[in-house]
Amino acid sequence: MLECAGMTPSFTSGALAAQLGAELVGNPDLTISRLEVIERAGPDTLTFIRDRLNAKHWLASKAPCALITRRVELPEFDRTQRALLRVDDADLTLNTVIDLFAPPASRPAPGRHPTADVDPTATIGAGVYIGPACVVGPGAKIGDGTVLKAQVYIGENASLGRMCVMHPGVRVLDRCVAGDGCIFHAGVVIGADGFGYRPSPDGRGVVKIPHIGNVDIGPGVEIGANTCIDRAKFGSTLIGAGTKIDNLCQVGHGCRIGRACLIAAGLGMAGSCVIGDGVMMGGQVGIADGVTIGPGATIGAQSGVIGNVPPGEAWLGTPAMLANYTLRDWANARRVGAGKPSINAGREARQAKRERPA
Amino acid sequence: MLECAGMTPSFTSGALAAQLGAELVGNPDLTISRLEVIERAGPDTLTFIRDRLNAKHWLASKAPCALITRRVELPEFDRTQRALLRVDDADLTLNTVIDLFAPPASRPAPGRHPTADVDPTATIGAGVYIGPACVVGPGAKIGDGTVLKAQVYIGENASLGRMCVMHPGVRVLDRCVAGDGCIFHAGVVIGADGFGYRPSPDGRGVVKIPHIGNVDIGPGVEIGANTCIDRAKFGSTLIGAGTKIDNLCQVGHGCRIGRACLIAAGLGMAGSCVIGDGVMMGGQVGIADGVTIGPGATIGAQSGVIGNVPPGEAWLGTPAMLANYTLRDWANARRVGAGKPSINAGREARQAKRERPA
Amino acid sequence: MLECAGMTPSFTSGALAAQLGAELVGNPDLTISRLEVIERAGPDTLTFIRDRLNAKHWLASKAPCALITRRVELPEFDRTQRALLRVDDADLTLNTVIDLFAPPASRPAPGRHPTADVDPTATIGAGVYIGPACVVGPGAKIGDGTVLKAQVYIGENASLGRMCVMHPGVRVLDRCVAGDGCIFHAGVVIGADGFGYRPSPDGRGVVKIPHIGNVDIGPGVEIGANTCIDRAKFGSTLIGAGTKIDNLCQVGHGCRIGRACLIAAGLGMAGSCVIGDGVMMGGQVGIADGVTIGPGATIGAQSGVIGNVPPGEAWLGTPAMLANYTLRDWANARRVGAGKPSINAGREARQAKRERPA
């Protein structure tokens, strides 16, 4: 039976096993009230075992209970004092376990903090919370149930959908738009001017190009802390529904990012890129301006993409190319450095003869 | 005749052609009220055609009017319903067209929001706007006509010139200085302490070095969202007049950046670098501490610069060197990986014989 | 004798020599009141000479007085008008000189600005300063003597130790913890949700994994401007005592960083990494998720670390390996490009024969 007293949830090991569809080995009556990595586990802790080394550490730890990946051999343990929950993949199951231990989502009660500055021409939906030191500009629209935590800035004629969460210090600048259910983390900047200049008429320095466009973000988008999405010179920078962008990313003016993309931290995307649906990018990727990346493509971490990537392909490296080629070049550099012939040395020698016959 | 009614500008195709010095082919009486890329164009849209593919897309689009680069062959179209404006370079002309469509710059009326906190010892110029939740410290100076949008922080004895725009959440910390006409985008941090430590006397860990210098920024500098410019240990970190720095860049303590530089997003510049006038850097460049880059040099995206760069040269790669060398090395890696001899294979073989005679 | 009048400290050259244990050559009665690089020195300036070129520049400068590294040959100069202070290492001594010239640390007087919003259930220590537009949430704890400069956000049940300094715009989100003497620079975000999703049950897109953990930061930690440390999915993201992290860094959910690490700007660290004590990282390093880096290891700038690094080793490159290997591979690429045989060319040729006998 699942029990949950007060703020902290609490379960028996047997109840957890039932809930997760796990095979229980050991004591079903252990009380579990938190999740932790093995090294920091206590006597009320559920932890997880993904390999034989973890299993060893578990035996030495205080955690009475652990998820264990089915293919890991069961260690010997005192089945009266401890319990293992066997599942196909302890890591994956963990992600659903977190839901069980998550405190009830605390949405602040609707209202408006006295230190918030909301323009009288703004349209504020039902059940909206606007926290301390927030600023909502003229003509802005805030959808029903949306939360502006604190120190948030919503610019002139900007618009947020329903049930969004804007964390402290988010700035959604003039005329930018976000759909329902978006989550923007602290310090996000939506709609700063793009980096666009033209040579000044006197040939000395440059002149700023006005940025009269905006940023248009679909529903269900989550944007990480201190990430910046620049507004388009004209038209819109677009972020498709359900796309997730990590912390400290830069998306240049006029980019069009598709739906359900996953983009890890540290991205540097120049202007006017077109990214298809379902694209995944590792951390610290750089994309040159105007590049097109096809739907379903994958870009490895730290890659520098300077050409178009076909749909579904995995690219890697600087300059990025098919990951297999980059991995081969990396291996070759290693081999040559270690005094071994390159992978294609035989072919290479024959080619050399052909290309330079005498 | 140019017409502009209310907030949204509106032009005839003929008037636009005259204004831009373009050759008009087709109907001069179309009404144009916005700019967009072809894919998102509507019946009132001016768009642009830079190649034959664009021309095809234009024919299928709703946009009645397009700029077209002169060398692109004119497509067949209904000249009673549509119009093309021929110019030397549609992309470049677009940047000036934006000026025509830009809404009149909206500077807030001078004044001070009741939630702003302005120290009585600060000197506030004529026509200054200080928005909600802004903080201006003791002894700070704000020049005539400068705008602090909202949630801006200007530290003790910091100083801004005339006609600057500080977007929401900008922080200019104690004693830092910026000249006339600077634009700092949301979340910029000017004058955080540099990353400077010395070994602690007990040999365990490090001790913070005080940073008693400041940041001194020339007139006409634009700094991108969430970019950080650290203060010098002593003296000043310098940014020259007219330099433009993109989003999410890091400039270390004591750097001296010249005039009219263009630096793309994601820079990581360590301390005490000296960057000449007119230097251009691509995205995600890294510069080691103390490096000197000569005036007019160009650094390719994602480069890692660990040595001095002579004036006017183009460098690329990690470690960065003359771009031609890096491009050659990249090509070589590709060739060797594909089983082809390296570009200099013949020369290489002769050298190998010479260096290892027996 | 050391003298210090008003805000600006002022010393004689003789007093400085005595204070620093330097050998004075020249006039001991010069008045020195500021520190500067040679190029920007004035008639009251102490500067520094680290090589012969600096010595030349000094002679042409206005600075009457300079620290000089002992091994640099003394230039000829007018010993009645100027003075040199000979020390073992002018650069190192400079760091201690800064202490002499540092203005007295100005801690704001304890108190609470009328525009600050402090929840009545928060626990505020003695001597705490809470500046304008700050927000302190329910159940938060602020230790004695801690300063929240302005526009700082301290979330629900978050906790700061004693004598911390939170610069403008810092956000320490719900339940996160920092020890005594921490310094967080402007725009730091502690405790945003990590980048964690699982495939949605309908196979279209992803579902957010709740992040019920926190960030737990030891005493004496300094974190640079706009850096982000994500909260753990469960348990804690850990930062050990005395660790210093530069600007614009990203630390993923569930990382455990040891004590006294030094991490330069632009880091991208994925989730669940384990970093030992005393690790040093250059700028723009990337670390793949789950990587372990042993105590005392060093990671070169722009490296991409995808495997575990043993204690004490120096690694470099993408993919990172022992720095010596990477440097050798870089040198080889250069040699091959220039038509020279690779460093191990002889060995390579013999290996090639052995591997492909016919």
Image (cartoon, coloured by chain):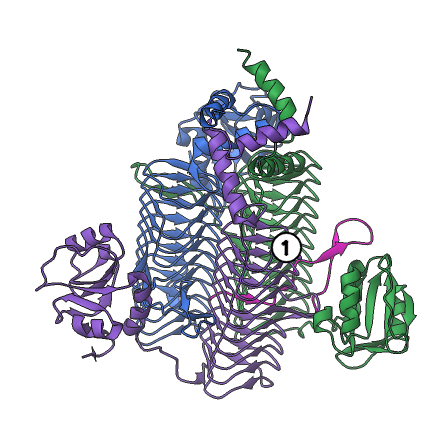
Chain colours: A purple, B green, C blue
- Toward the top, the furthest residue is B358
On screen, residue B276 versus residue B336, left or right, reads: right
Q: If the image is split into quadrants, where does the C terminus of chain A sit?
A: top right
Name the quadrant containing residue A153.
Answer: bottom right
Q: Nearer the viewer, residue B73 or B167?
A: B73
Q: Position of residue A63 (x, y in %)?
A: 17, 60
Would you say the magenta stretch is mainly helix, strand or loop? loop
Q: Residue at 58% across / 84% down in the picture?
A: A122
Residue that mark 1 sits on: A308
In this view of the protein, can residue C13 be seen by the observer? no
Q: How many marks?
A: 1
Q: If the image is split into quadrants, where does the N terminus of chain A sit?
A: bottom left
Q: Residue at 64% across / 24% down in the picture?
A: B346
**The residue stretch that appears in magenta:** A186-212
In this view of the protein, can residue B75 be seen by the observer? yes
Q: Which chain does tag 1 point to?
A: A
The three-letter amino acid code for the residue at tag 1 is Asn
Q: Nearer the viewer, residue B243 or B134?
A: B243
Q: Residue at 55% across / 42% down in the picture?
A: B254
- Toward the front, the furthest residue is C358
Q: Nearer the viewer, residue A328 or C69?
A: A328
Q: Residue at 78% across / 48% down in the picture?
A: A204
Instruction: In the rendered view, tell whether residue B64 sits above or below residue C83.
Output: below
Which SS class for mark 1? Answer: loop
Instruction: In the rendered view, tell whether residue C149 sits above or below residue A110.
Output: above
How many neighbours does mark 1 have within 10 angstroms: few (below 14), some (14-19), or many (20 or more)?
some
Residue B165 covered by magenta stretch: no
On screen, residue A348 versus residue B98, left or right, reads: left
Q: Position of residue B6 (x, y in %)?
A: 77, 82
On screen, residue B186 versus residue C105, left or right, reads: right
Instruction: In the rendered view, tell whether residue A340 sits above or below residue A218.
Output: above
